[in-house]
Amino acid sequence: MSFPKSVPVLILCVLAVALTATSALPRANMTVVQEKAFRDQQRPPAVFEHDGHNVRADVYDCSECHHVYEDGKKVENRMSVGQECSDCHGLQESGENAVPLREAYHTQCIGCHSDRGEGPLACGECHVKD
């Protein structure tokens, strides 16, 4: 029995799609905000189901959260997808880091919830204790 010549090509295409799809899985499966830079946490990590949140919030522009700033201004059409927030935001304010990490998260999340008039605003609504 011989295989048609198109079978190997089909197998390669399926593998390529599978490998590409798995690169999106870390965020798709994300259930809490895990930031390695926070070593001594006072509260548990914020509960955050990435894809479900974005569908409910009607957020489809990744740069709304995964932004890039230069000289204090947001750079349009640039995203920091795939980076940790701590890659740009350190734990403490410094010359190159105007917004410390914890403040960056809180400003981003609570600010958006407040502006939209929906979503959690209190600490324990995101940082849910078991």
Image: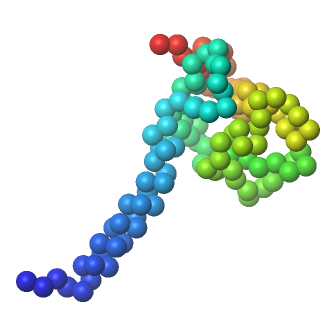
> Where is 43 relative to 35, above or below?
above
- Location of residue 39 (image quadrant): top right
Picture coordinates of residue 85, whole percent (x, y): 69, 39
Query: What residue do we see at 87% from left, 48% from top?
Result: 73
Figure quadrant of the N terminus: bottom left
Q: Tell me how the rendering is colored.
A: rainbow
Query: What residue do we see at 64% from left, 19% from top?
Result: 41
- Location of residue 22 (image quadrant): bottom left
Query: What residue do we see at 73% from left, 56% from top?
Result: 78
How many numbered marks, from 0 up?
0
Picture coordinates of residue 56, whole percent (x, y): 53, 36
Residue 64: tell me if it is visible. no
Q: In this view, does 130 lie to the left or right of 98?
A: left
> Where is 68 relative to 37, above or below?
below
User: Residue lying farthest front?
Assistant: 39
> Where is 5 relative to 58, above or below?
below
> Where is 59 relative to 31, above or below?
below
Picture coordinates of residue 101, whole percent (x, y): 75, 31
Residue 75: tell me if it is visible. yes
Q: In this view, does 103 lie to the left or right of 55?
A: right
Q: Is residue 54 left or right of residue 29?
A: right
Q: Is residue 93 left or right of residue 26?
A: right
User: Residue lying farthest left?
Assistant: 1
Query: What residue do we see at 77% from left, 35% from top?
Result: 90
Picture coordinates of residue 38, whole percent (x, y): 66, 27
Depth order, front residue of 4/38: 38
